[in-house]
Image (tube, grey):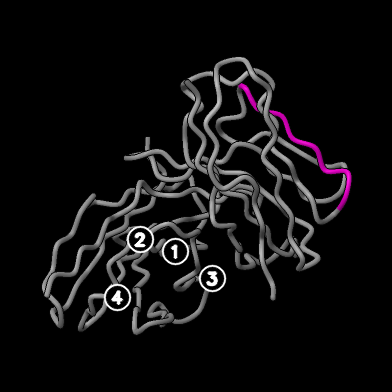
Amino acid sequence: EAQVTQNPRYLITVTGKKLTVTCSQNMNHEYMSWYRQDPGLGLRQIYYSMNVEVTDKGDVPEGYKVSRKEKRNFPLILESPSPNQTSLYFCASRFWTGGEAGELFFGEGSRLTVL
Amino acid sequence: AQSVTQLDSQVPVFEEAPVELRCNYSSSVSVYLFWYVQYPNQGLQLLLKYLSGSTLVKGINGFEAEFNKSQTSFHLRKPSVHISDTAEYFCAAFRSGGYNKLIFGAGTRLAVHP
């Protein structure tokens, strides 16, 4: 089954304790992206990657890091989480066709609480 | 300025009634427009998209949307809603100049009542 898998789905942590949210897709998609969803703000893009070793900032990258060492994986790293990073996080992927807007496939989300 | 604006944060409606969820876009985004739906505790899934061609776009689950360039709108409609349509709906568009960044509106929560 084609899917985007995120882990963990739920996490409560404390300020300053490094954490990683993993994302894996099995559709051979070139493009992957992380979003955070907050009430009244919709989804805001954190980082995206157009292919292996190619990443770039989205609209709200502060406090986050990413890496793309393999095509299928795109982990989101919070080096020193703070309470304002409490949010619902989504990973998404799609084919990167350049000239056409392909469908974006989403994971089920990771709800993170930073105390 | 908001690039994609959803004009209603919540829309309550009775079952079998028609519904319209409104979306306006600004000049800072492309005219590749999307509607996504998010059911409770799930990720987003694509309802429909407008890339070019006919301004009336049909999607899944009986939804359709009309692209109106003069009014910079892309409103979503369904002639008769079901309880199962209760969800949050997001309008989205690519930022002008590329396909790297999909910009989402703030979302509209559709609540269908029996």
Amino acid type for the residue under numbered disc 4: Ser
Which residue lies under the disc numbered 4? B84
Q: Nearer the viewer, residue B95 or B103?
A: B103
Looking at the image, do the residues carrying marks 1 and 2 touch, with CB atoms under 8 Å apart?
A: yes
Q: Position of residue B61 (x, y in %)?
A: 38, 82
| Amino acid type indicated by mark 2 | Tyr
- Residue B95 x/y as whole percent: 55, 48
Which numbered mark, 3 or 2, is in the foreground of this view?
Answer: 2
The magenta stretch is A63-70
The answer to whether marks 3 and 2 mark residues whose Cβ atoms lie closer than 8 Å is no
Question: Reading the chain from its start, which is encountered first: label 1 or label 2?
Answer: 1
Q: Which mark is residue B36?
A: 1
* SS under mark 3: loop
Upstream in sequence: badge 3 or badge 2: 3
Our reading of the magenta stretch's main secondary structure is loop
Residue carrying label 2: B89
Q: Chain of mark 2?
A: B
Asked if the stretch drawn in magenta spans residue A64, the answer is: yes
Element type where label 2 sits in the image: strand
Q: Residue B51 shows which numbered tag?
A: 3
Q: Of label 2 and label 4, which has the lower sequence position?
A: 4
Q: Are marks 1 and 2 on the same chain?
A: yes
What residue is at 77 percent from the left and 66 percent from the top?
A: A26
Residue B110 drawn at (x, y percent): 24, 62
| A56 horizontally vs B61: left or right | right
Within 10 angstroms of label 4, few (less than 14), some, or many (20 or more) residues? few
